Image (tube, rainbow, N blue to C red):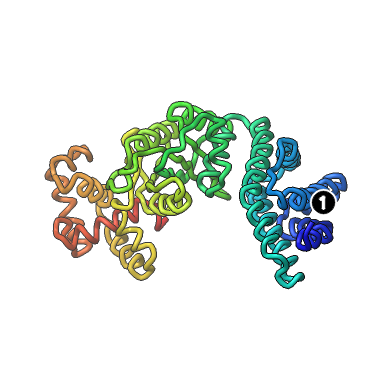
Amino acid sequence: MGSLFAELARQASANARREVDAYLREIPEFRSWESRPRVAAETMEYSVWLRRRTIELSPDNSGLTDDDLGYIAAIGEVRADAGMSSDSRQQVLQLHTALMLRDIHEAAERLRGGDVEELMQVMTWFAPQGDRGIVAYRRGFLTVLRRRLPYVGQVALLARSLLTGDPMAADLAAALDLELPGSCAVAVIRVPDSPLNDRDLDAEIEALVKTHRVPVVWYPKSGTRGGELIAVVPCADEAVRLPSAPGAVADLVGDFTEALGRPCAAGTAVAPLDEVPAALERARRISESAPLGKPSRRLRPCTVADVFVELAVADVPFIDTWLHTVARSLEPGPDLVTTLDAYYRHDMNRGAAAASLNVHPRTLDYRLRRAAELTGIDPGSAHGIRTLSAVVTRRLSGAWA
């Protein structure tokens, strides 16, 4: 064994202790294990073993054996059984990889560079075998989660994995027989007030998953009965360029809002699979700017093309304040916000707008004139369309509640 490998062997126990200390310091869930000596000892033993196997196998570029991978998977099972979350699992893998690389770098520095060939040997071994080890660890972790979680919980875990870019998503999707395509639409349905208790909500989500065969997860909003239902819906690559939401998203939104029976708002954004976390941020902001609509299969999920003005306004407080002032000036009129909403949604077609409001076209005309009197802005002018449509959408989104 060469000098670099000898140095790594000499430092194996100390480096393993440093890794365990890093877990205790940086991952809160590990701190609760300090009172469980057996688990702490297993963690230390595993950390030492992995370093020694690296030293044994890398000089000849030998791969981890099936027994090695089985042991790594068993460690993943132990930690999942102890209640480790998926987020902490990711932190463990990132910390472990960073610290193993630091071990190698520091050993080479102590030897003032040492044998370059030895350094290349260990680095050449580390990348592919590290990947194999991570896959085995993930597989063991997932085995326990699938055993402990109901079907809806497993689907929710898949959705969270996709939304956070967790590589475990691919394994979980395969286990659940759900498709992971090249592009996805992330749909965020904002529910200010859910009428369902947890059991009924789970039942509705399970029905939704079984009907649409897509990952779905519910995020409750702290301190309220509301929250967000988030779905990751497969779609064609060209959907990225379309101004409207894919049909599959509209169907899912319609089914859920109809079952819920409460006003909701929905936003959606399309992205390649590896950019889903960024699409979630966009879809969430769109849903926050989208108007709350009556629960119906016809409730249309908004895209950035629908609310780009309101998204920009929300980031400029003095403009938002001005629009809010315009909105308050409409309060003395009879249902003026609802009237303007119908007028703009029907592309200023008076007949269609009046029919949707169940009023005579002359009543619609009166209300539009009243809006112009109160605000000083003609709803049918270019200025009126730009200003009052933004006022209506901001008001109906609940942004000024």
* Pick the front one: 354 or 281: 281
Helix, strand or loop at label 1? It is helix
* Residue at x-position 39% and y-position 44%: 266
Tell me the quarter of the picture where residue 143 sits.
top right
Question: 10 Å neighbourhood of mark 1: few (<14), some, or many (≥20)?
Answer: some
x, y percentage for residue 3?
Answer: 78, 63
Q: Is residue 21 visible?
A: no
* Residue at x-position 70% and y-position 42%: 64
* Pick the front one: 173 or 302: 173
x, y percentage for residue 401?
Answer: 42, 55
Quarter placement of the N terminus: bottom right
Q: Is residue 5 visible?
A: yes
x, y percentage for residue 379?
Answer: 17, 57
| 298 on left or right of 153 | left
- Give the residue at mark 1: 44
* Pick the front one: 245 or 234: 234
